[in-house]
Image (cartoon, grey):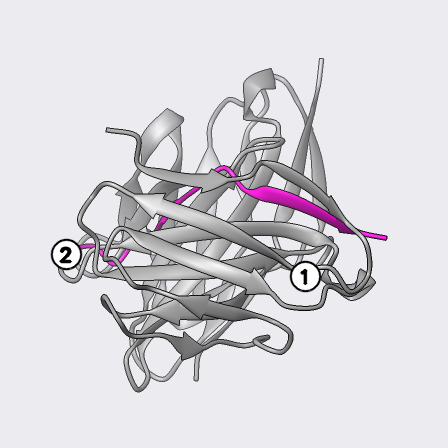
Amino acid sequence: NAGVTQTPKFRVLKTGQSMTLLCAQDMNHEYMYWYRQDPGMGLRLIHYSVGEGTTAKGEVPDGYNVSRLKKQNFLLGLESAAPSQTSVYFCASRGGTGGFEQYFGPGTRLTVT
Amino acid sequence: AQSVTQPDIHITVSEGASLELRCNYSYGATPYLFWYVQSPGQGLQLLLKYFSGDTLVQGIKGFEAEFKRSQSSFNLRKPSVHWSDAAEYFCAVGAWTGGFKTIFGAGTRLFVKA
């Protein structure tokens, strides 16, 4: 039982390049989230999904797109990376009932030069 | 909508000393309250949570937190800190506002000195 995994762990992009971050969970969770973490700002929600085939905008969605084609996977895309997107990205998931706590992946450190 | 404040950006305590990390929230009703810990280079891990019932909640790693409705607080405590407790701690507030939403505080970084 791996929990929540993220790929890749590190990435360096040049301005204007694109990339996709992959999040996978093996807990059969309905809800999945993408956050970015910047110093002194805590976690800010980018996009989330309440189930397979659904996505919704969070607090800071601009410049990002997401897809949830399979229940266990949640992809975060950057179409044209900007230096302001340099951050640590975390994926999380939670079940549809019960405790409402989220389970986090180990993070992806992205640097955009 | 709910909000959460962690007044201390960082705290330094000596190993073996007691610890209290502050968390204040704003919400019209009793929210769902969480404390998470993030070790360097890791994701967040749940320490404990409160939804209802006994206002003193026990968590993992010897941590506890107390919900005080009158003060809108959910402070995290540990009687004796170990060097391995050095990490960043996040308080989070969950509430039903057009779906269940969780807001995270900015975090408090704990330094432990020998």
Q: What kind of element bears circle 1?
A: loop
Q: Seen in the image, is A77 located left or right of residue B77?
A: right
Q: Are marks 2 and 1 on the same chain?
A: yes
Over which residues does the magenta segment extend?
A98-113
Q: The disc labelled 1 sits on which kind of residue? A: Met
* Pointer 2 or 1: first along the chain: 1
Q: Seen in the image, is A9 located left or right of residue B72?
A: right
Q: Residue A102's x, y, as percent?
A: 34, 52
Q: Which residue is mark 1?
A: A41
Q: Residue at x 46, y 32 (%)?
A: B78
Q: Which residue is mark 2?
A: A98
Q: Residue A35's x, y, as percent?
A: 53, 59
Q: Residue B2's x, y, as percent?
A: 44, 78
Other-residue count near label 1 (Cα within 10 Å), few / some / many at <14 / 14–19 / ≥20: few
Q: What kind of element bears circle 2?
A: loop
Q: Chain of mark 2?
A: A
Q: Residue furthest top?
A: B114
Q: Residue furthest left?
A: A97
Q: Residue at x 36, y 50 (%)?
A: B66
Name the foreground residue: B15 vs A84: A84
